[in-house]
Image (spheres, grey):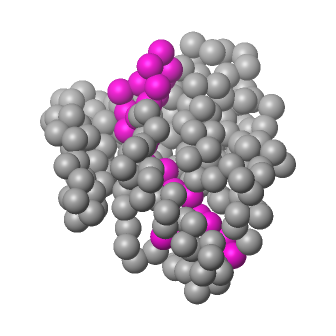
Amino acid sequence: MSNVENVCPQVLRGVTRELRRLAANPPSGIKLVLRDDNITDVVALIDGPADTPYAGGVFRVRLALGREFPTAPPRAYFLTKIFHPNVSVAGEVCVNTLKRDWRPELGLEHALLAVKCLLIAPNADSALNAEAAALLRDRYDDYFARAKLYTDIHARGREAEAGACAGAGAEAAAGGEGPRAKRERRPAAPPARDKRRILKRL
């Protein structure tokens, strides 16, 4: 649901400027999905960082800006299903930067980078997924394997391509070239069905 009418015009103008800047010059591994209908609901695609169980995946993330933004931080959600100690089953994200450490001057770019950093350095001490946190602390290999399985099933192939195409379409409408769509067009791996069966038993 749009929150545009609840945000003051000056803040909306600032958000619009930052979104345009991020679309033209995005942070490494992050691609904005431009939307004209609701700029208080920011969607981005984040590449899974190398040397993590999320490598090779593309994760769709949402920042919801409330009426108190930027005094209050945006709320962050993973729209792509992920196994991570700081992400709830519903996709809600817990990170200090978007909680007690938030400052109004940080902006949307910093918020997106904070979410990306969670993929590199998960924190078992502020968990929203207790099972993932316990595995991260006590059985890291099992945590890595489970997180990678989720990545293979939910953040690759057709799921990732669908997100990339949506982003490319929005960028094309804004005059962009949509380079990520070319890079992410690859068929889903045949073993995905077997992985889905495994996941149902977990």
Residue 36 falls inside the magenta stretch: no
Determine the image quadrant of residue 169: bottom left
| Front residue (pair 13, 168) | 13
Residue 115: tell me if it is visible.
no
- In the displayed structure, 80 sits above or below 142; it is below
Residue closest to the far right: 100
197 or 192: which is nearer to us?
A: 192
Q: Where is residue 154, by image quadrant?
A: top left
Left or right placement of residue 53 versus residue 110 in this view: left
Q: In the image, is 113 to the left or to the right of 177?
A: right
Q: Where is residue 62 in the image (x, y as percent from the top left)?
A: 51, 56
Return the x and y of residue 41 as percentages of the image width and height: 51, 67
**In the depicted structure, whether residue 138 falls above or below residue 65:** above
**Which residue is pictured at 57% across the width and 74% down the height?**
12
Q: Give the range drawn in magenta.
A: 39-67
| Residue at screen point 23% across, 37% down | 184
User: Is residue 39 in view?
Assistant: yes
Q: Kindly identify the residue that appears in the image at 38 percent across and 67 percent down.
A: 35
The x, y position of residue 102, in whole percent, is 77, 50
